[in-house]
Image: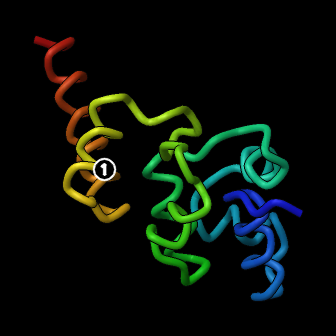
C-alpha cells in the first residue's frame, strides 16, 4: 500500500487505539471530514494538519514527508514554492510557513 497522509493518519490513530470519532473530537474536526482524509477523498489544510499532528504525536515534517509534491491542501505546490524549496533546500515546516504567509497575504489583499 502506498503511504499517503490519509494512510499515515489512520495508522497513527489506530496505533493510539483512537476511534475516528475520538480523534475528530480531540482535533476539533468533523468525523466525516477525517473519514474523507483517511480515504484520500479530501486534502488537509495547514490548520487541520497541525491539529491532527498534535493529537497524534506527529510532526508536520512527518506528515509533509508523505505529501511528496503535494501541498497541505492536497493540491500541487505553487511553482514559486517548488523553486524556492529546491533552490534553498527548505525544510517542510518552512515550506508550510511560506505557504501560510502567502495565503494570509492574499486574504489581506482581497479584503483591502
The residue shown at (21%, 12%) is: 110
The answer to whether 64 appears left or right of 108 in the picture is: right
Hey, which quadrant is residue 23 in on the image? bottom right
Colour scheme in use: rainbow
Where does the image place residue 86, in percent across and percent down from the top left?
30, 50
Image coordinates for residue 61, horizontal then vertical, percent? 45, 70
Q: Name the residue under label 1.
A: 86
Residue in the image at 52% along x and 58% along y: 49
User: Badge 1: how crowded within 10 Å, few (<14), some, or many (20+)?
Assistant: few
- The residue nearer to you, when weighing 105 against 27, is 105
Q: Write the residue at 23% across / 44% down.
A: 84
Depth check: 31 or 87 in front?
A: 87
- 84 in relation to 96, above or below: above
In the displayed structure image, the side of residue 111 where residue 73 appears, left or right: right
- Check disc 1 and report its element: helix, strand or loop: helix
Image location (x, y in percent) of residue 45 = 50, 44
| Residue 12 found in image quarter | bottom right
Q: Which of 53 and 21 is in front in this view?
A: 53
- Quadrant location of the N terminus? bottom right
Amino acid at each position: 500500500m502506498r503511504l499517503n497522509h490519509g494512510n499515515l493518519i489512520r495508522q497513527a490513530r489506530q496505533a493510539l487505539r483512537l476511534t475516528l470519532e475520538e480523534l475528530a473530537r480531540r482535533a476539533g474536526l468533523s468525523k466525516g471530514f477525517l473519514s474523507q482524509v483517511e480515504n484520500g477523498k479530501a486534502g488537509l489544510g495547514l490548520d487541520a494538519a497541525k491539529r491532527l499532528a498534535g493529537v497524534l504525536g506527529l510532526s508536520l515534517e512527518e506528515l509533509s514527508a508523505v505529501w511528496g509534491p503535494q501541498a497541505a491542501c492536497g493540491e500541487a505546490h505553487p511553482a514559486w514554492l517548488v523553486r524556492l524549496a529546491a533552490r534553498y533546500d527548505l525544510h517542510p515546516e518552512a515550506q508550510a510557513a511560506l505557504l501560510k504567509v502567502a495565503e494570509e497575504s492574499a486574504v489581506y489583499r482581497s479584503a483591502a
